[in-house]
Image (cartoon, rainbow, N blue to C red):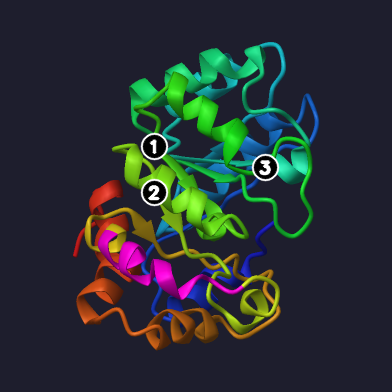
């Protein structure tokens, strides 16, 4: 969970808006997590109201309830949660979110350790069923970068976040393919790449994420888009 010092630290770092992304890893916890994250957003200016859900009876009610309370972004972690995003228990939830247009940050890539439901296959099937979902693939989809870049290009509302991607920490495990820099640039300029950080749970200074984005040299317009403009447009944030 986020402690009381983090919002102030983010403000001192120049961060104007941030999320409080929690994710359920078992039944009967999503609603209580949403109580906490929504209350946290209400008491911390700049925090986007954030929520989660889990494949269980009543999942769609949890999602609809969070939306009614102002949730603007959701988080799922397929690896930690160990669940299949194609579960019939989630189908109504996906429909509600597609209709609402609310972004859902999904850790769907197989890093650091794969399970049977990570990778582009399962979540790709969800997108085929619900093509208007605003899924945001965490970590640029690492380590299956190429597949998640292609999914993002294929679906209008799909996007990627940069969390830990391109940093020294990730590059040692699975370097981002240089052959896909042009595609990453084009997707960023098209509004489909958003800054992510996982702060404060990171093994390097916050600034290193920004350095990692700058050093691939995709241009100032791309950096402005990724670090501010794309999220500002998606969430209606003021300049």
Give the number of the disc on residue 134: 1
Which residue lies at the image location 55% right of the left edge and 38% below the top edge?
A: 51
Decide whether residue 68 is among the magenta residues.
no
Q: In the image, is 203 to the left or to the right of 52?
A: right
Q: Are marks 2 and 3 in contact (CB under 8 Å)?
A: no
Q: Are marks 1 and 2 in contact (CB under 8 Å)?
A: yes
Q: Distance between the residues labelled 1 and 3?
A: 17 Å
The span picked out in magenta is 175-186
In which image quadrant can residue 202 be found? bottom right
Q: How crowded is mark 3: few (under 14 residues within 10 Å), some or many (20 or more)?
A: many
Predominant secondary structure in magenta? helix
Instruction: Report x, y in % for residue 141.
Output: 55, 54
Would you place residue 190 above or below residue 92 in this image? below
Query: Which residue in the protein does label 3 denote?
Result: 23
Query: Which residue in the protein does label 2 denote?
Result: 159
Give the number of the disc on residue 218: none
């Amino acid at each position: 969970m986020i402690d009381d010092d983090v919002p102030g630290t983010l403000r001192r770092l120049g961060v104007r808006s941030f999320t409080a992304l929690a994710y359920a890893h078992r039944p009967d916890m999503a609603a209580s997590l949403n109580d906490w994250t929504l209350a946290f957003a209400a008491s911390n200016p700049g925090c986007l109201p954030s929520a989660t859900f889990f494949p269980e009876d009543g999942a769609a009610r949890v999602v609809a309830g969070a939306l009614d309370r102002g949730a603007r972004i959701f988080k799922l972690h397929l690896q930690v949660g160990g669940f299949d995003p194609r579960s019939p228990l989630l189908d109504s939830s996906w429909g509600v979110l597609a209709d609402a247009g609310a972004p859902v940050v999904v850790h769907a890539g197989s890093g650091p350790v794969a399970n049977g439901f990570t990778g582009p296959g399962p979540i790709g099937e969800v997108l085929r069923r619900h093509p208007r979902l605003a899924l945001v693939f965490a970590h640029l989809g690492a380590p299956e970068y190429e597949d998640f870049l292609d999914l993002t290009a294929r679906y209008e509302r799909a996007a990627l976040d940069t969390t830990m991607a391109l940093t020294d920490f990730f590059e040692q495990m699975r370097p981002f393919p240089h052959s896909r820099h042009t595609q990453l640039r084009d997707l960023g300029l098209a509004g489909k790449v958003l800054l992510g950080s996982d702060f404060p749970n990171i093994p390097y200074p916050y600034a290193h994420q920004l350095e990692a984005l700058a050093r691939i040299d995709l241009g100032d317009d791309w950096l402005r888009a990724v670090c501010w403009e794309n999220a500002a447009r998606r969430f209606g944030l003021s300049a």
